[in-house]
Structure formats: C-alpha cells, structure tokens
Image (cartoon, coloured by chain):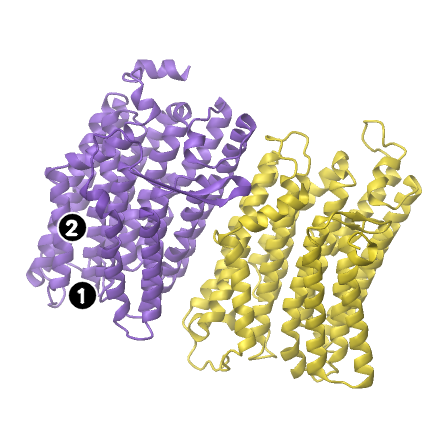
Amino acid sequence: MILTSLILILLATGLVAWLSESISEGAPKWIAAIGLVVAWLPLQPLLSGLDLSLQQSWLINEIYPWIPRFNISIHLALDGLSLLLVALTLSMGLIAVMAAWKEVKQRQGFFYFNLLWSIAGVIGVFCALDLFLFFVLWEVMLVPMYLLIAIWGYENRRYAAMKFFLFTQAGGLLMLLSIAVLALLHYQQSGQLSFDYIDLLQHQLSETASFWVMLGFFIAFAIKLPIVPFHNWLPDAHTQAPTAVSVILAAVLLKTGGYGIIRFVLPMFPEASIEIAPYVMSIAGVSIIYGALMAFSQQDLKRLVAYSSVSHMGFVLLGCFAFTSLAWQGAVFQMLAHGVSTSALFALVGAIQFRYHTRDLNKLGGLWQSVPRLSAVGLFFVAASLGMPGLGNFVAEFLVLVGSFTKYPTYTIIAASGLILAAIYSLTIAQKTFFGPLKLEQAIDLDKREVAMMLSMVLLLLYMGLHPQPMLDLAQQTLDRFPIATSPSITTSTTIAGVVK
Amino acid sequence: MSDTLGYALLPSIVISSTALIVMLFAAIKREHRYTSLLTSLGLFVALSIQLSQIKNAPFQSDLFLFDGTTSLLSALLILVALLLSFLLYPWLENLKDPKEEYYMLFLLATQGALVVCASSHFASFFLGLELMGLSLVPMVAYPDRDNKALEAGIKYLVLSAVASAFVLMAIAIIYFYSGTLDIQEIAQHLPFANNETQVNDVIYGAAIILLLVGFAFKLSLAPCHLWLADLLEGSPLPTAALLATLSKAAIFVVLIRLFSYGNWHQQEAIIVIISAVAVASMLIGNFLALLQNNLLRLLAFSSVAHFGYILLAILAIQPADSIAGETTLANEAAIYYLFAYLLTSAGAFSILMILQHDTPSLPFTLERLRGLFWLKPATALVLTLLFLSLAGIPLTIGFVGKFYLTLAAVNGQLWGMLAALVIGSVVGIYYYLRVVLMMAEKPKQQTTRYHKPHSISDLIIMGLVTLMVMGIGIFPAKLATIIEQLVA
C-alpha cells in the first residue's frame, strides 16, 4: 500500500487544492506544499529501516489485478533507482511549488491541481512495473503538463505546448507498438499474455524482433531525454513554461527518459543495445557538443539553460550505453545532479524574470550590485552546472567519462570536450548577468522563502558532491541485477564483439 | 420462451410500438412534453429488455441472428438513442415547426439500426438500411425554413439513394452467382468456392466493389467521405448525432458479420480494397480535419478517420499469419472500438447540444468555444475529456479501444496499416488539442453567450457521459470480460 497511498495522496491533494480555490485565493499553494511534505510519510518506514545488504530485488512490491482479459495488473515496485528518483521528484516538486508561490496569480487552484497530478504521474512512471500501466502513466503525466504550459506559459505558449505534446505522443505511440509486439511474442512462446516487466524480462527475442522492439522503446525515451535529432521541443517548452513547470520539466520529466533506458531498454534487450551502442555513443557525443554550442549562442537566458540540459542529458545517454558499472552509476548520478542543478538555474532565471521582466542576456548585467544574494547563489549554481569539483555534477560527469573511456575512448574524448564548452557557456551566464555595470534599476533581493528554496538546493548539490556514496549504493542495488552487468565476460571491449557475434 | 423469435425481437417490438403510439398520440392531441417522455420511456424499456437478453444463448432465424455480439451492440445502439432522446426536448421546444413527428422518425431510425444490426440475410439488411435511411432524410431537413438543412436533406436523399442502388445491384449479382441471400451461406454456394484460386470473375468482382462502395458511402469512408461534413454541418444537431453514430455503427456490424461469418477475409481482392480504403480514410480524414474551423466538420472528418482505424480490426480477423493465435482478439477489438467511438461521439454531440441551448442560431465555429474553460468550466472539462478520448489518451475509453486495435493489428502483422495509424493519431492529436486550447484561451470581454446556468438534466447527462468515458477508461476490465465471453 506504500506506493499506492503515495500516489493517491498526491492525486487527492491536487483535487483538494483545486476545490479550495473557491474558498480562499491563497489556499491552493499551501495545500500543495503540505501535500508534497505529507507524501513523504508513506516512505518513512522504508527510509528509516533501509538495509541494502539484504539481497532482495525490490524494496516494495505491490500488485493489484486490473484488466484480467489481458492479464494486466497494477504492479508498482520500488528499488534503489526508483527510490532515488521518487525522492528527487518529491523534493523538486516542493521547490516547484515554492517557485510558483508568487509568480502564478491566475486560477491558482487549477494550476496546483495540474502540478500535483503531473508529479503523481511521474512518480507512477518511476514505480510501474507493468508495461501497460507504465504506458498509461507515461501519457497521463503529459496532459496536466500540457495544460500547465498552454495556460500559464509566456507569449508563445500554445505553440510550445503543442510541440511538446506532439513529440512525446509520437514517441509514445511507437512505444505502444513495441509493447504490443513484445507481449504478443511472449504469448506466442509461453501461451500466456502478460504485460508484466518481470515476465517479459525473462523472455528471449529473436535478433530482428529484439532490434525493432528495442528501437520503439529507445525512440520514445530518446525524445523524452532529449537527444539531438529529437530535442527540438525542449527549448520551446522550457522557454515558454512558467518557472515552476520548467523546474518540474528539467528535474523529473526528462529523467523519465533516462529511467526508461536504464529500466527497460538495457535489461530487456541487452544484445540489441550492445549492437547499437556505437551509434548511440556518437549521437550522445553530438548531443553534448551541439547542446553546448547552441547554449553558447543563445540570448535568452532560459533557452540557454534549456540547451545546456540537452548537453547534460547527452552524458546520461553516454553513460547508459557504455556498458560498464561505473558509467551506469555516473548516468544515474547525472540524472540526479542535473535534476537539482538545472532546476536551480531555472528557479534563478524565474527569480530574475520576476524582478526585471526580462530574460535577455543583453539587457541584464551587473545584478551583483543590485541583488547580491541572488547573484551569489546564482554563481554557485553556474559553477555546479559547469562541473566544479565538490559539487554533484562533477561526480556524475567524472564517473561517466571514466566508465566510458575503457570502452569507447574516441567518443569519450569528444564528450569530454563538452565540459570545456560547458565552462564557456556557464561563465557567459555569470559574466553577462551578474557582473559588469548595472543596466537595470534596483530591485528587491531574495526574500526568506526564496533564500530557503535556493539554500536547500545548494546544500543538496554540496551533499551530492562531497558524499555521493549512499546514493551510489542505492543505484548500485538496481544495477547489480542487470543481466549483463553480472556476467563477468563483458569487461573488455574485445569480448563485446564476441557477444555480438 | 427465451429462444423464440418473439422474445428476441422484443426490444424492437417495444420501439416500434412506441413509434406507433407517438404517431397516434400526435393525431389525437399534440402534447410535446408527454411525447418526449414516452419516447425516452420506450427506449428505456427496450434497453432494459435488451440488457437482460445479453447472456442468452444465440438464436438464429431465417432473417436474423441474435448472438451475444448482436445483443450487446443493440444495447449500445439503444443506449446512444436514449442518451440523445433526453436532449431532444429543449431543442424541439425552441423550434417553430411541429415537434411530435421528430420523435416518431427518431424511433424509426433507431428501429432500422437495430434491424440492420441483427440481420444475417441481405433482405433484412436492406429493409433495415432503408428504414433507417428514409427516416433520416426528413430528420436532416426537419427545420424546413433553414436553407442549409434543406440542402443537406436533398444531398442525403440523393446520395443515400445512389448508395442503396449500388448495394441492391451488388446483392442481385451475388444472388445470381450463389442462389442465396443468407450471409453465412453465400461463400459456400459460390461456384468457385471450393477451389483455392482467387475469385477472378469480373462480374462477381464488380458486385463486390459495388457492395463495398455502398458500405463505404454509408460509413463515409474515403473516397466516399465528403458528404458527411456537409451533412453534419447542415442538419440539426440531434440528426447529426444519429448520422455520425447510430447509422454508421449498425452498418459496421454487418461488415464485421460479413468477415467473421461470410469468410470474406479469404478473398484477397477484398482485403486489398479494404486496406487501401482504411489507409486512405485514416490519412485523408485526419488531414482534412486539420483544416476545419467548424467543430461539426471537424467531428465529421474525425469520424472518417475513426472508421478507418476500426477497419484495422476487420482486417485482423483471422489473418493469414498472426503472431499469436489469438483468434477472437480482432472481433473483440472491433466491438470495443465501436463501443468507445459511439459513447465518446454521442457524448460529444450531447455536450454540443447542451451548449446549443444558450445560443441556438450561431454556427459551431471553433471561435465559439473561446474561453469556455473559464465561463462554463464543467462543460469545458467534459468536452476536453471527450476530445482526449477521441485522441486516444489513456484513462479514457478511447485509449482502451485504441489499445485493443493496436494489439489486434500487431497480432495480424499489419505493419503498413499501423504506420498509417501512428501518423493519423499524431495528426489527430493536433486538431483535438486545438479545440482544447481554444477553450483555455482568455474569454473576450463582451462575451454574454454563456449566461444560462446548467439545468439539472444537463448536469445529469454530463455526469453520465463522464462516468461512461472515464469509468470504462479507468476500469475497462468488466466490459472486456463481457465482450470476450460473448465473442468466444
């Protein structure tokens, strides 16, 4: 009941927040914030008694029958990876509510309703182990997100919302086809229709079938991640979305793509994944460089951060397909670190826009003289984003690069050059916004709520950078069960060729 | 008692008698309120009888086949008619023409749909088809001071007659070859039934094409789809709703029957034609819907596309090489999708009818929905839900239907068709969401269009529609089990 009640709490809070709008204008945000805190309660017994030394595969495992005709059940489960991502979602959800606190003034009830429902959907995605349920939640989290961008976004919101929805839908439909093929092939072999992850995991596909099915999943996740040919929706969606939605989008929605690859693509289609790994690595390299170059040439601060996201998520893909334990850990850690650091940057841009009503780098400048507190935390987040040692992103990128280098040295070297580009665009942000002569009039510095919000993210990034081991252990709990990770034969690049043959 | 023809026909008898009583009542004393009540009551009684018959053993007479599929779909047709009948009263009350006749025609059209749905013989099929078609013509042109309605009525009369003539000609040729009009027996009695080679006879081929053209017209499948948009736009809303749901669904049931009993899937020429029609309908329907600014025209083209989708299920009935031997899956998919489409579509039309109460004369442009979210949130939410269901977004019945279809089509390995389905769906989402976006826009200042509060009956209907679309969308298990048992 733990996961079910967690999701239900969020859904119910959303409804209450919406209804409370008619009683009091200010009520919905308080209710949303309280709901996100209360949602931790079901996880409490788990977190306090967390013992990873037990060799159990799932920390929580809940199954309820749903559609017996197709043997579909509501199968929710939690392991180390899911737990990390659920925790990230809940904390960033709270940050999002705080970011929206003063910014959202219209129809607050409906806003927080959508926010909470999309958070609930994302948590469901991280826990669902029935492929049908996974698909349902995958789509369901989009609808509130779409409304959030379409109703509360900036000037060009309708275009951005539509683009966001169409891209993810197209990927989603391909994934649905893949799920159908997978389930039917399983039925053909075993005589039993099943959409359950654990059943399908044990299923051996023929080489061609495996390739096409894998491709359907991969494209859906690559669109979400996003990876270069499919990244088009992200800058628009981020630029047009209100701050809180940008935070959710960057912190957790993109992570569903990375999660999908780690949870489904790699363990279910190991051979096919190894086969396409070189191509994927090169795409990841292109993503890292291209995202960084594009970020460098943006005038709009939010667009800049969005493109930097594309670059950072390239590292996740790189880590996933390197097929070494270190790189996988790096990929998971990059998802977490990027979730916090990029959300922080978006929250910062939101705070700047709230004060100066512009995000144009040419119009900003010299903010340090006007709002020193904001600029100081800003500098910190910029440093985190460029991969400063001691902060979360550094650990992640370092792990990915070290892990990938043994297998794919060329791609890794190319990807590593992305770090230099990251330094360039990050320092551009710092220089053009915080330093130089003040071009705009004075404004009020961060208030207590904002300081608390920013400071919590600062602490999180520091913790990740200085003491990453607990989180890595949790991630390792999932990675240990990878069928390919446990087989010792795949440790050098020469044996990989053998496996492919 | 339970296996007699009379018992199986009882719902139809109830509906016909209601029609007769309505007619007699109108001759003696015109009383709109009672006529309306009587109609709904008759349909309700018919629905409850039909529902009680679902689990009965199949029963076949010379002209009719009453099996599980028939009963379930008949129940669905009556349900849709019942839902729409609640909304007739406010519309007719505002109309200056005589009112009672519409109820009679409405009931007769429903009756025709039921006959078509249960027919297992070309004679009964044609009788039902004409009963339905001829009742619909005056219903289209009912507000006879409205030029658009008159134009639509004449269009429908001419085109429907041409299509019927095609069907009749085809039936005649088929009879000439097989000597029987029974759908199940035709395939066995054909002179070339026993050899494995494909049917090459030119005249017989022509008959098949004539029949398919007739069907394509009635189902408004591409390339015979253009009439539907004009008709939905021109005819009064309740008639438009019947045209888009009841008449199409009934004919589709016969198509399913031709495939599952008539063994049509063994003839390759038919498969090729239907595949082409399906792809064309999916693509043309969706792309044309993209260009529409009138909500009814949009719904018309979306209906074209949806019937293109559902042809996938027809094609997947006993395919040549299926992945898994799920034989009944395609049948179930067709029925589930019909369910989903009919409920959603009827729901959408009833919401439009509710909106129509406020401003009866305005055309249903997209612009008319601007700001509906903030002016009438409940209506807008239900309408959003229905459009999401049409788009096939999860937690709605439309998604379950689409899931069934995908599974059936994958099972039949119809990859080309699936590609068209994916493209069509993505395009579809664009125009459905356009409507939702328009409702979420800020309302214009001088808007006084939506001033009336909802009446209680409107609220009940909206609640009912939501319950059906979301209820089955979230908990599809019950219906899935029923359909599986009936088809097996």
Q: Colour of chain B?
A: yellow
Direction from residue B424 to residue B263 in the image, left or right: right
Residues at marks 1 and 2, common chain? yes
- Chain ID, mark 1: A
Alpha carbon distance from label 1 to label 2: 21 Å
Quadrant of residue B206 within the rendered picture: top right
The percent coordinates of residue B480 (x first, y second) are 58, 47
| Front-lying residue, B485 or A158 | B485
The image shows residue B362, relative to residue A247, as above or below, that is below
**The disc labelled 2 sits on which kind of residue?**
Met
Quadrant of residue B420 within the rendered picture: top right
The percent coordinates of residue A238 (x first, y second) are 31, 53
Q: Residue at the location (12% across, 68% down)?
A: A441
Q: Earlier in the sequence, mark 1 or mark 2?
A: 1
The image shows residue B107, relative to residue B312, as above or below, that is below
The percent coordinates of residue A488 (x first, y second) are 29, 16
Q: Name the disc covering residue A457, or none.
A: 2
The percent coordinates of residue A63 (x first, y second) are 40, 42
| Mark closer to the observer (1, 2) | 2
- CA neighbours of label 1 inside 10 A, class few (<14), some (14 to 19), many (20+): some
Query: Could one spot residue A28 in this view of the protein?
Result: yes
Q: Assign a secondary structure to mark 2.
A: helix
Q: Residue at the location (47% across, 63% down)?
A: B436
Query: Could one spot residue B371 in this view of the protein?
Result: no
Q: Which residue is mark 1?
A: A355
Q: Colour of chain A?
A: purple
| Front-lying residue, B154 or A255 | A255
**The disc labelled 1 sits on which kind of residue?**
Arg
Q: Name the disc covering residue A382, or none.
A: none
Q: Assign a secondary structure to mark 1.
A: helix
